[in-house]
Image: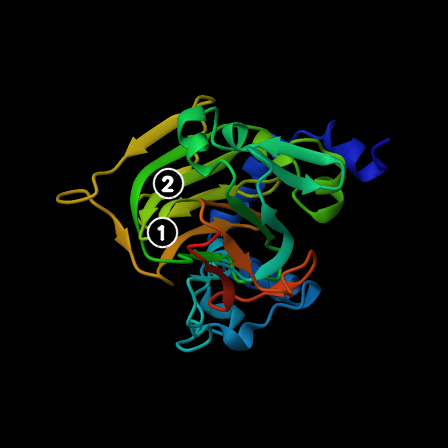
Amino acid sequence: MPTPFVALQYLLPKQLLTAAAGAFARAELGGLTTAAIRWFASRYDVNLAEAEQPDPASYRSFNEFFTRPLRAGARPLATADFVCPVDGAVSVVGALDGDRLVQAKGHSYTTTALLGGDAERAARFAGGSFATIYLSPRDYHRIHMPLAGRLTRMVHVPGALFSVNPETVRGVPGLFARNERVVCHFETAVGPFVLVLVGATIVGSMATAWHGVVNPPRPGRIRAWDYPLEGAGAVSLAQGAELGRFLLGSTVVMLFPKPGVHFGADWQPGRPTRMGEFMASISAQG
């Protein structure tokens, strides 16, 4: 049986709530915006000392605050094959069971479903690895590249807007393949790599460094953009470069190909993460 909190989410007008939150977050309301930022920072213990602009009054809108850049040097990059792309907490990491990812105990979903039904691209990750990281409201909400890569495709997949907090992840089957998401496909020195930005209730929009805001609009159908590997329109990102951002918090899911990806031994569920720290190494032996 779902918990009351999870059951309530099936009834809430999530799209309407998200649209209203997005409108407020974009609005420039002067003192009201500053008061909202001060309340939020206090309520969620946001570390503004790390921000490039630590003064809440310096942000014209809540979105500016929520996607705030950090001061130089706040997130140094480790020497690693894969660095952590976000501040957050480990939800689950591990090997794919064929084409299935673990969501939580008793729940799994397929790579094809995660990628919006693209079985051909999903097959490239069969037997590979995955990592899911949850970003709480207090976290830094820009997303960075775990390794250098060249963008080949971006897909906006419409869907539900369930919360992605741990209680909901445990209670809603196939959550990350049901919620709205932006799927980013890359070619890298170690093969294909996918990073998925998963939307949630109150997540007003998601944006990428090369496209800007992806949603809204929300036309209710899959939208895809393809990118050349070279020449005009090509997008190449270095390790640690900004990939995108959430306008309010959510989750990222990553897919890694064979050979074996080896996560840090302490990368267990609930472990806090910091962007730029060691995440994983890769071995030719798998």
Give me the residue at 80% from left, 31% from top: 7
Q: Residues within 10 Å of mark 1 (few under 14, many from 20)?
A: some
Report which residue position mark 1 lands on. 190
- Give, as a three-letter code, the residue at label 1: Val
List x then y, in percent, for residue 36.
61, 59
Q: Alpha-carbon distance for marks 1 and 2?
A: 13 Å
Q: Is residue 36 above or below residue 117?
A: below
The residue closer to the viewer here, 82 or 41, is 82
List x then y, in percent, for residue 73.
41, 78
Give me the residue at 72% from left, 33% from top: 172
Image-quadrant location for residue 153? top left
First reached walking from the N terminus: tag 1 or tag 2: 2
**Which label is found at residue 61?**
none
Image-quadrant location for residue 223? top left
List x then y, in percent, for residue 148.
33, 57
**Which label is found at residue 185?**
2
Give me the residue at 16% from left, 45% from top: 230
